[in-house]
Image (cartoon, rainbow, N blue to C red):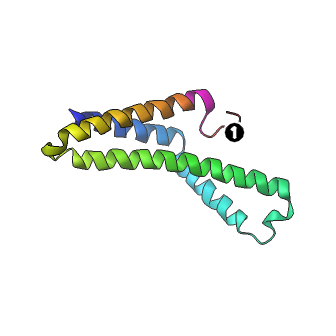
Amino acid sequence: MASDRLTTLAEKIAATTKLLKIADLTQKMAALAVQMKEPNFWADQKRAQDISQDYEDIKSEVEKWGALEQKVQDLIELATDKSLADDVGIQTIELEKQFSKYEFSLLLNGPYDKSN
């Protein structure tokens, strides 16, 4: 049943985001955003570029996992409607594939590896 698979997927995502320390990354992203707003931020071009790139990398990772988590939660809510069972099943498969792709990427690269 799709709702069981979605619950399992939600648990896997929660475990992965905990492992990735997404909450810590979110805090780091906020701290970097504050630094980027400082009046003399661009005085040191190299440092500014490094901070900006780090911010973008973290933001991308946080948003990617947050969006996946939200899609799963939305589908869990829709799974209660039996008339949507086929659509929920198809979307569940897609989200499982997306999670597997993200998970595989982590095995190869790390949470936000700049070296590809």
- Residue at image mark 1: 114
4 left or right of 24 in image: left
Residue at 74% over, 69% down = 38
Tally of numbered tags: 1
Residue 36 part of the magenta-drawn span: no
Q: Main secondary structure of the magenta part?
A: helix
Residue 41 in the image: x percent, y percent? 79, 65
Residue 15 appears at what percent x and percent y?
Answer: 44, 38
State which region is magenta.
106-111
Q: Can the viewer see residue 8 in this picture?
A: no
**x and y percent of residue 32 in the render?**
67, 59
Q: Do we see residue 78 in this rendering?
A: yes
Q: Residue furthest bottom?
A: 39
Residue 109 magenta: yes
Which residue appears at 24% of the width and 40% of the height? Answer: 87
Q: Is residue 43 left or right of residue 49?
A: right
Q: What quarter of the picture does the N terminus occupy?
A: top left
Q: Residues within 10 Å of mark 1 (few under 14, many from 20)?
A: few
